[in-house]
Amino acid sequence: MQNIDIEAIMREIRREIREDPAFQEPLTLEEIPSLSQTDNTVVMGGLYDEELLCRHVGEMGAHFAVPYYRPIESRRAKAFFKRVLRKLLCFLLRPALEEVSAFHAMTASSMNAAANFIREQETENQRRDRRIAELEKRIAALRREENKQEELS
Amino acid sequence: MRVVQLLSTLSFGDAVSNDAIALKKLLSQMGFSTGIYAENVDRRLPRGTGQRVEEMPPLSHGDVLIYHLSIGTELNYHMDQYHCRKLMIYHNVTPPAFLAPYSRISERLCLEGLEGMLHLRDTFDECLAVSDFNRRSLLHAGYTCPIEVRPILIPFEDYEREPDKETVERYSDGWTNILFVGRVVPNKKHEDIIRAFACYKKTVNPKSRLILAGSSSGMELYKKRLEDYIAALGVEDVVFPGHSTFEQILAFYRTAHVFLCMSEHEGFCVPLVEAMYFNVPIVAYAACAVPDTLGGSGILLQDKDPVLTAAAIDRLVTDEALRASVLEKQRRQLEHFSYETVSALFQKQFETFLKREN
């Protein structure tokens, strides 16, 4: 195996591209305005996607609670001040966050029920489709039988 | 003695979940009674792979809890309730700033993940970091417990499965295929891959395509932004196959000529190892754990100059000697991540952990 110095090759490539006017740098992402910056259809009105729905419902179930109490990670004085602030605001924030969490829980529960209902309906639809296909086959066979008997009579 | 693994989400196809599943198998082979427990368990996983955290049996002092940390979750604040020996596997947390413009939920989860990581610094008896970069991150965060490096456990036998025939046929048409595999998320910098590809396609090789394999679920706005960017650059043949089957992923690797990674945040980057396994030469930007995983193999870029990247891709595609040399180094590096090597390393580390704690 030939031992190749990749650093030397990269230096060579750098030299080559400096001398080659054909190479042009394309614009960066930041230089190009988004054609859809205000378009929120992806978030708000996307097509039905079972996998996405299941994932989002799962995430809703795991993260519906907005906790009031969060550990404070700071140095002594700062941490003390933050703890005092947390204590002072407790009467105001805790009930509000509990209401928000309760609302989230109801939404998550409803979404979960809706997702289960959709899944059950899909299974039921598939079962009905199979049943309809079977019945259509039987109808076609009976029609053929009827036509034969008519021809004979 | 029971050894249980705990993580936020056990999902289908992501590196953290795959690592937990491979470790479960290994722990079972080592003779431990084991299981995986998570707040969310993906329905697509085979029955019995993992259970919900509520079903986790109570742990006693002799048991071991292995906790995989990669995201913000309530679990980060409940570790004190487990009165057993605790080992953390740190996969790193994506810096929230990357996600802020596209998903407030993801941004918050990552912010909480970093807060959780700081909160847990005195909780574990030992940590295993999946890369040296992760080990340094833990030290930087003030962790004082012993920290060992143990790469992600990858069962390579799975990669010997038959690739999807239709995909292989579609992309075996004489064109040059440049591949990146990974979720469509802003820290992976798909825009920089697209930018380098635009330069390569327009200047060097019009008969080339870029395949960006990976799910964009939860990052639909970022994907839309990338599609707008592609349209504005006027570059064709950029393929987003979306969430692909395992067989399709195998087909992408089998038909790829170069693996291009411009990611700015990786805790390990399993796709680099996969590219090594499939003999696809790698061009990658040197960020976070990428240099650790490459270990001197592949072509490592120190900056993101799209012209330089395009020229390096061209050289790898056309210079047989360079390609052979790069692939040889990658094969040597791959030995560090073989199932046998990593499982033996884990067994040794785990036995040391048990002895130390006893």
Image (spheres, coloured by chain):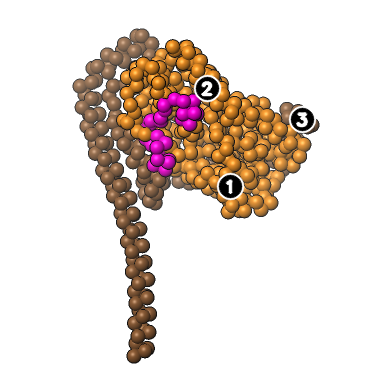
Chain colours: A brown, B orange
Mark identifier at residue A4: 3
- In magenta segment, residue A146: no
* Residue at figure coordinates x 48%, y 39% from the top left: B13
Mark identifier at residue B347: 2
* Residue at figure coordinates x 36%, y 62% from the top left: A130
Q: Are marks 3 and 2 in contact (CB under 8 Å)?
A: no
The residue under label 2 is which amino acid type? Gln
Judging by the rendered image, the residue that carries numbered circle 1 is: B163
Closer to the camera in the image, B238 or B100: B238
Q: Is residue B135 above or below residue B19?
A: above
**Do callouts 1 and 2 point to residues on the same chain?**
yes
Q: Residue furthest right?
A: A2
Secondary structure of the residue carrying tag 2 is: helix
Task: Tally the marks.
Answer: 3
The part of the chain drawn in magenta is B24-50
Residue B141 point in image, percent of width and height: 46, 16
Q: Chain of mark 1?
A: B
Q: Nearer the viewer, mark 1 or mark 2?
A: 2
> Is there any visible trace of residue B165 in the rendered image?
yes
**How far is the residue under mark 1 from the one under mark 2?**
32 Å
Q: Are marks 1 and 2 in contact (CB under 8 Å)?
A: no
Q: Is residue B266 above or below residue B203?
A: above
